[in-house]
Amino acid sequence: MALLSLTPFLSLAVFGLLATPAGFLHFRKSKLGLAPFVCILGLAIALVSTVWLGFTSPSPVSFGGFQVDLFTLFFSGVLLIVAIFVTIASLQYMREDPNKGPFFGLLLLSTLGMIVLAASMDLILLYVGWELMSIPTYALTAFRKKDPNSNEAAMKFFVLSALSSALIVYAISLIFGVTGSTGLTAIASSLSTAGPDVRPFGVLAIVLFIVGFGVKMAVVPFHMWIPDAFEGAPVTIGAFLAAGAKMAAFAAAFRVFIVGISAFNVDFYSTFAIVAVVTMSVGNVAALMQKSFTRLLAYSSIAQAGYILMALATPFTTTNVPLGLAGGLFHVLNYAILKTAAFVAAAAVATKLSVTDLNSFNGLSRRMPQTSLSIAVIFLGLAGVPPLNGFFSKVMLFTGSIYSPYSWGGYLALAALINSGFSMSYYGWVIKRMYFDEPGDESSIPEPRIYMAVLWVATILIFAIGLYPDPWIRLVQSAAAALVGSRGL
């Protein structure tokens, strides 16, 4: 069973290595080559095996620092869906690019690093997954080599990511010095009985982990690279960074703080609550002032990170799985679908209009009606409007905060509710531009079928999860229970 549990990881590794040489092979009349189809096949095998393991694995499987449990499978499923959406959208976006092989190979290897993060129960393995996720994304961000904006974005991304990696390594060394182990369950057991002489080192390690993970999670004040990276990278890679790399960083943070560090008698929950409020507030206010659609999506993703961070502001016990944690996982799923689709819509507009300035969205519903409808649904879902999927995950997050044992839980929920309402100002502004403003040119624009396929699948999921949330709520509650139960205390 242990070998079968490795199927998603092996599929991504094997096909990731095959994708680059497959880029040199072409069909007779096709410009795409074999690389994207190798990529889709590898992702499909990984996703099918992940779903199969979710239904057939009654108990966690642990080996060599990996733990394949429902939490791992949940995050793997979410990240693989994001990767499949990005890959399919890239069939159109990368059609004329001669470097398709390396592009899709790097995409697969980065996805492999992401699901390794979700499965890591050892800090050394977690760091390996972190680098395996990060290094390919540097190259993917700078893939448009002749575009100075792309190169600048990749450089900023690289410098801050390298800093975050260094801080995480330092935090791991401190934890090892305090506990003598890099295994999360052993760390939890050791920290639960830690004396006052090692307390300062433990607190410093917590701070370093928050900063290191915070860069990839794009929480304030470690969010500076996000707008430039999302605008400079290929638009589909912006989706991969926003919905893939960011969610993988949250998976790593959930593992480290809930499994390893929550046994330490330190109140880091208040810190996460403060950072969550600041992050969602700064993201929403900055998004309102943007003139570029991709930068608006970037700041919107920062605000959404603040909502998910609320899940880490709730204490955890082995016998009680907080509603906020389950809500956080639910919002991970909903955010991944919504934000990936938003960037795919941006790619559709950029492909046909060659600009992503918000002025180009004036009267867009008359020129690209399907894309406009998808954007409207996506934005309403991100704002948490019922009966779309974002509504229920926000309700769970806010309710979990209200029932927090801390007195500030209600204030955190109120701040999040106000921010959620405020976000409608810029989401509604874009919708108003598309449906009520006059276009400069009223000629109809043919909408790319590949993009439309992704957008319609995402739109169906947005409505399906929102109208029938019960099975998804049970799934995230089980995934949260698996995570809390893996503490072994």
Image: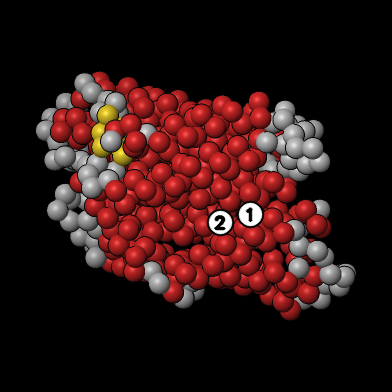
- Tell me which corner region of the image, top left, top right, bottom left or bottom right, holds residue 16: top right
Colouring method of the image: secondary structure
Given the image, on which type of amino acid does mark 2 rest?
A: Lys
308 left or right, relative to 136: left
Residue 454 in which image quadrant: bottom right
Q: Which residue is mark 1?
A: 343
Residue 172, position in %: x, y?
Answer: 33, 26
Asked whether the residues under the numbered discs 2 and 1 touch, taking CB atoms below 8 Å apart as contact, a structural biologist would say yes
Where does residue 14 sit, x and y in percent of width and height?
Answer: 51, 29
Residue ID at (46%, 60%): 334
SS of the residue under disc 2: helix
Amino acid carrying mark 1 in the image: Phe
In the rendered view, does 226 fall on the left or right side of 418? right
Residue underneath mark 2: 339
Q: Tell which of 320 and 369 is nearer to you.
A: 369
Crowding at dot 1, Cα within 10 Å, few <14 / some 14-19 / many 20+, comes out as many
- Compared to residue 311, the image places residue 99 above or below, namely above
Q: Residue 174 placed where, x, y %?
A: 30, 24
Seen from the viewer's position, the closer of residues 139 and 215 is 139
Q: Is residue 61 visible?
A: yes
Q: Residue at x 72, y 30 (%)?
A: 25
